[in-house]
Amino acid sequence: MVTTAATPDKSDRFLLLDGHSLAYRAFFALPVENFSTTDGQPTNAVYGFTSMLINVLRDEQPTHIAVAFDRSEPTFRHEQYVEYKAGRQKTPDEFRSQVSLIFEVLDALRIPRLSVAGFEADDIIATLAVQATRAGMKTLIVTGDRDAFQLVDDDVTILYPVRGVSELSRMDPAAVEAKYGVPPQRYRELAALVGETSDNLPGVPGVGPKTAAKWLTKYGDLDTLVARVEEIKGKAGDNLREHLAQVLRNHQINKLDTEVGLELTPPQLIMGQWDREEIHTLFDSLQFRVLRERLYSTLSAAEPEADEGFDVDLDALEPGALGTWLDANAGDRLGIAVTGTWGRGTGEITAVALASKKGPAVHLDPAELIEDDERALAAYLADPARPKAIHEAKGPMLAFAARGVTLDGVTSDTALAAYLALPGQRTFDLADLALRYLHRELRSETEESGQLTLDGSGEEEAAQALAVRARAVTELADVLDKDLEKRGATRLLREVELPLVGVLADMERAGIAVDTDHLAGLSASLGGQVKEQEQDAHSAVGREFNLGSPKQVQQVLFDELNLPKTKRTKTGYTTDSEALTNLLEKEPHPVLEHILRWREVAKLKSIVDSLIPMADDNGRIHTTFNQMIAATGRLSSTDPNLQNIPIRTAEGRQIREAFVVGDGYESLLTADYSQIELRIMAHLSEDEALLEAFGSGADFHTITASRVFGLPPEQIDGELRARIKAMNYGLAYGLSAYGLSQQLRISPDEARGLMEEYFEQFGGVRDYLRNIVAKARQDGYTETILGRRRYLPDLNSDNRQRREMAERMALNAPIQGSAADIIKVAGLNVHRAINTAGLTSRILLQVHDELVFEVAPGELETLKTLVSTEMAGAYDLRAPLSVSMGTGRTWQEAAH
């Protein structure tokens, strides 16, 4: 973290940050409800702090740096004044859990952090600032504590947050005097007179900064003011004389200690060399995708990780020579890089580069290829025996298909391979992976390559850059192959993820037909309901207000109606749906019903309105499936997100009514797995009672409830069944006793007792859940039935909250990940079987555990048999897979 001190020179810039001050500001500047990981860890403070830090490092380019933090022990100021900082609100738990995360960010960036028992952060900062000035360094202090203004001089400048931590004001001597009317050396005296509420240091009543500045300007300093206090006239003078003792006490307490004993001096606090791998691991766990990209694109603090690029010999081919070039490089797995556009089931290729790891490469413009070269390229791309490597293959696959060209024989998609190796990461940029795995930059080593001269026209540079990408892909593929071999993920890539790319491309290309008239009618209907709920809410209150404004909703609920307060936030009290639902149970006021219903129908209307323009000229919507988002292996759907359509409400089901069978087909068929997570849990735990419940053929939740409550199945009512259903699924999702209590709206103790009763009957489940966490803590990861790993370094974290979240992920990942693996295998097998059987029917969608098919005339029974066989046989579980199917003209009619 700290290197040997160097002799300062005139260019040395020392950056000091007040850690707690800035983190606390960040916490209140960003809504905690909007910043958390998918596992529930709040990240608003660490996000805001890190964002501010990146900006300051970028803008100020310091050579030396340190971050000072307060400690929990009392300071010398508490000894002088026992009421110092008394009355401060309790630190929010959501903030406290993030301090250690900020420490981890600083440690990963190799930024020294300092704290000393008995002293505050600003004492450490004051000490270092004085030492830095003596060492001939210029100092910048980033703090939200105004006490630091007393340090400002020609060598020390304060960067003071004026809006959260995103906007900093530069406070030099002139700026301090302009704002407060006194020079920096008098600021401490002004603060003694005015007081500081946050420190519980009351000032002179009725005396503000302007009056205090006028006095200090007139008398020169506080000592002279005190000596001549009898000259101050009026009420202000009386108040000053009455509170003179506390002014002197404030002045003493406000003094920053510049003699704190520190082990390190400013010249030793050199900006460190951060490590890309460590940043990746930490930012993966915090899910800081955008911040990671900003860090890498704006900061050069890291020691150069690559001092070379890629040697590429870009061959200038004569027309008709491409086939010969491909034959000459037939022994290599070529890297492919393309430029173009794709999405919504189609695309367009504008350029292609092929490169061998030995060096030769070609750049091709498909629009300018002669017929022989076009045929040679198409034959090569379609040949499954010619191994290829490409980065993010699905988009190019769609674009090639639009030209009538098949892309086959891909043995490595370097983005997919990196996803299996680093499942917690959110982006898989080729340049970043080249640095991470190859320690090389994505650039050409030569200014001239073959017959290509870089003349500044742009075309040559673009050709060279694309060839470099192709070369990087083929080298990266080799390294990732070895990495996946070590991780046991080679089979998962080759047999599941890579073949699935082609299946998903086919599904995206097909799309699903949609009835836009139905959607338009539904939009109008929902719009009417939105208006109706809005009017009813206004009537319930007796005045108009904006239901979409949290501030106005707060005012109505808590100020005007005096309803019980919800959880406090920076801007008042939370009005999120969960809080209002809980409030409705306690205080069934009609306005709460109307607000919640208004939100529900407004959300549905926004979904419907977003779908209408998505339909293409053929009346079909083409979603985009992504294999590299969820760490569990689940597919995601975007543009539009068809996994986001609710099916538990009547309106949500009406949206599904809009998805219909297309022209030339006779119906839709849906098929999904029944209770797949529970069957996987029974399989992995080998719990005999659970396996017996599945084998009975009776309702699973009724049978398990019967065992837990000791009642015959016919006496299990809806409430008891619902409790055990929540338990069954909750355990598969890593649900805690508290989570179960919230779901069932019972006390945590009651939920804990229910879990104990459950485990008495299903001890194998208890043992499995206990052992899976212990094994994951030992191995550092969990595994699915197909070997998909989820790496969980936080299982050994000192942060209790992060450790407990990692434990819940360890419980969840094998079951959820195995379900994702199985539905992927099912989709692959069904797609393959449809082609083998020569059917015209096709898969359109995969949504969670459901597959949606478009059925060609006369093929329904054949397809149903084929789908049932392939899905049920996707994996041999001890609790065999069960498939449910339905057919209909619409997606909703085909539900089952």
Image (cartoon, rainbow, N blue to C red):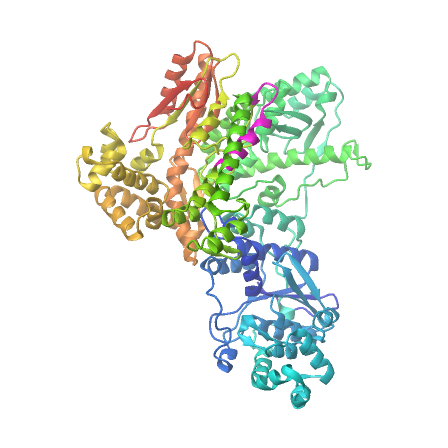
Can I make out residue 137 in this image? no
Q: Is residue 792 magenta?
A: no
Give the quadrant of residue 640.
Answer: top right
Nearer to the camera, 531 or 710: 531
Q: Is residue 618 magenta?
A: yes
Residue 247 x/y as whole percent: 59, 82
The image shows residue 840, relative to residue 627, as above or below, that is above
Residue 829 x/y as whole percent: 43, 22
Residue 778 x/y as whole percent: 38, 50
The image shows residue 515, relative to residue 695, as above or below, that is above
Give the quadrant of residue 450.
Answer: top right
The quadrant of the image that shows the C terminus is top left
The quadrant of the image that shows the N terminus is bottom right
Residue at 64% in and 74% down:
208
Residue at 51% in and 82% down:
80
The image shows residue 637, relative to residue 166, as above or below, that is above
Task: Provide the residue span drawn in magenta.
Answer: 601-620
Name the residue at the top extreme. Answer: 858
Nearer to the camera, 505 or 450: 505
Left/right of residue 17 with respect to residue 745 in the rendered view: right
Nearer to the camera, 672 or 340: 672
Give the quadrant of residue 862.
Answer: top left
